[in-house]
């Protein structure tokens, strides 16, 4: 059985190296912390972050690539 995804306050994000699209540095930013992928809003770095396991991140990417979120626009 896999352990539950940690809460953002359970991860040490002080050394995280945040990545953003070169043409949208204020947009979504991701970082790889331990075995997790962390997502934040680039223009509000104090906003809550989202934490994904590798499997959750792959599912998110597959959904985005497949147009699953297009209905939200």
Image (cartoon, rainbow, N blue to C red):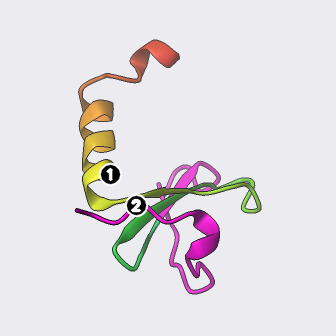
Q: Name the residue: 41% across, 23% down.
A: 69
Q: Decide which of tag 1 and tag 2 comes sooner along the chain.
A: 2
Above or below for 21 versus 32: above
State the predominant SS element of the stretch in magenta. Answer: loop
Q: Which residues are magenta?
A: 1-30
Nearest the camera: 52 or 25?
Answer: 52
Mark 1 vs mark 2: give the one in front: 2
- Number of numbered discs: 2
Q: Position of residue 72 (x, y in %)?
A: 51, 17
Q: Name the residue: 52% across, 70% down.
A: 18
Q: Name the residue: 26% across, 42% down.
A: 59
Q: Which mark is residue 67?
A: none
Above or below for 32 versus 2: below
Nearest the camera: 20 or 10?
Answer: 10
Residue at the outermost front position: 1
Q: Position of residue 64 (x, y in %)?
A: 33, 33
- Helix or strand or loop: what does disc 2 sit on? loop
Which residue is the site of mark 1? 57
Pointer 1 local density, CA inside 10 Å: few below 14, some 14–19, many at least 20: some
Which residue is the site of mark 2? 4
Q: Is residue 4 magenta?
A: yes
Residue at the outermost bottom position: 15
- Helix or strand or loop: what does disc 1 sit on? helix
Q: Evaluate if marks 1 and 2 touch, with contact meaning CB atoms under 8 Å apart.
A: no
Above or below for 18 versus 4: below
- Structural distance between the alpha carbons of marks 1 and 2: 14 Å
């Amino acid at each position: 059985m896999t352990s539950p995804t940690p809460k953002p306050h359970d991860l040490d994000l002080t050394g995280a190296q945040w990545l953003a699209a070169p043409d949208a540095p204020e947009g979504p930013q991701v970082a790889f912390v331990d075995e997790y992928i962390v997502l934040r809003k680039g223009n509000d770095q104090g906003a809550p972050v989202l934490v994904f396991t590798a499997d959750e991140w792959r599912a998110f990417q597959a959904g985005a690539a497949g147009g699953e979120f297009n209905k939200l626009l």
